[in-house]
Amino acid sequence: EGADLLTRQAAGNPPAAKEAAKQLTHKLHELKAAVQNALVNRIVQDFMDVSTPLKQFTEAVMLPEGTPGREQNFNQKSNNLQAFSDRASKTSRMVAAGGACGNKKNAEILLSS
C-alpha cells in the first residue's frame, strides 16, 4: 500500500519519482539487513550447543534396564534430540533459501558469529 501511495504521488513528477525510488531502495536494504541479522541470530542460537541433546540421549540409552524412570527419561531425551534436529534442519533450509550460501558477506557474518 505504501508503494502504491508513493507511485501515485510521484506520477508525472520525475524528481518525486526519483525520491520515491530512493526511499523504497533504502527501505529494502533495511529489510534485507534485518532479515540477515535475524537469520544469523537464529543460526547462533540453534547451533550454540549441538552436543548436549546428543549427549543426554546417549546417557538415556546407556542407563541399565530396570532403572526407575528409564523409559520415560529415554522418551524425553529422544523427543528433545528430535526437536533439536528438526529445528537445525529448518534453520539450514532457511539459510539455503535465503541465499546466504555463495554470498561472501553472509558467509563472513556466519563465520564470525
Image: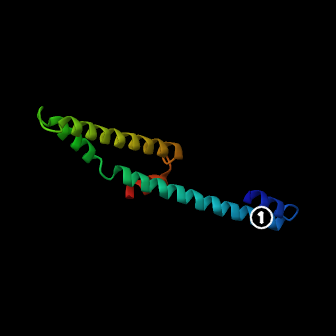
Q: 44 and 64: which one is in front? A: 64
User: SS for tag 1?
Assistant: helix
Q: Is residue 27 left or right of residue 35?
A: right
Q: Quadrant of residue 29?
A: bottom right
* Residue at the spot 83% in from the left edge and 60% down from the top edge: 8
- Where's the N terminus, which quadrant? bottom right
Give the farthest residue toward the front.
Answer: 68
Q: Can residue 41 be seen from the camera position used here? A: yes
Coordinates of residue 112 in the picture (x, y in percent): 38, 58
* Residue at the spot 32% in from the left edge and 53% down from the top edge: 48
Q: Quadrant of residue 62?
A: top left
Q: Can residue 108 be seen from the camera position used here? A: no
Coordinates of residue 94 in the picture (x, y in percent): 49, 45
Q: Amino acid at mark 1?
A: Lys
- Where's the C terminus, which quadrant? bottom left
Q: Is residue 36 left or right of residue 49?
A: right
Q: 45 and 108: which one is in front? A: 45
Q: 63 and 20: which one is in front? A: 63
- In the picture shown, does residue 1 fall above or below 72? below
Q: Is residue 39 left or right of residue 31?
A: left
Q: Quadrant of residue 85?
A: top left
* Residue at the spot 80% in from the left edge and 59% down from the top edge: 7
Dot 1 corresponds to which residue? 18
Coordinates of residue 47 in the picture (x, y in percent): 35, 50
- In the picture shown, does residue 62 fall above or below 29? above
Give the farthest residue toward the right.
Answer: 12
Q: How is the image coloured?
A: rainbow
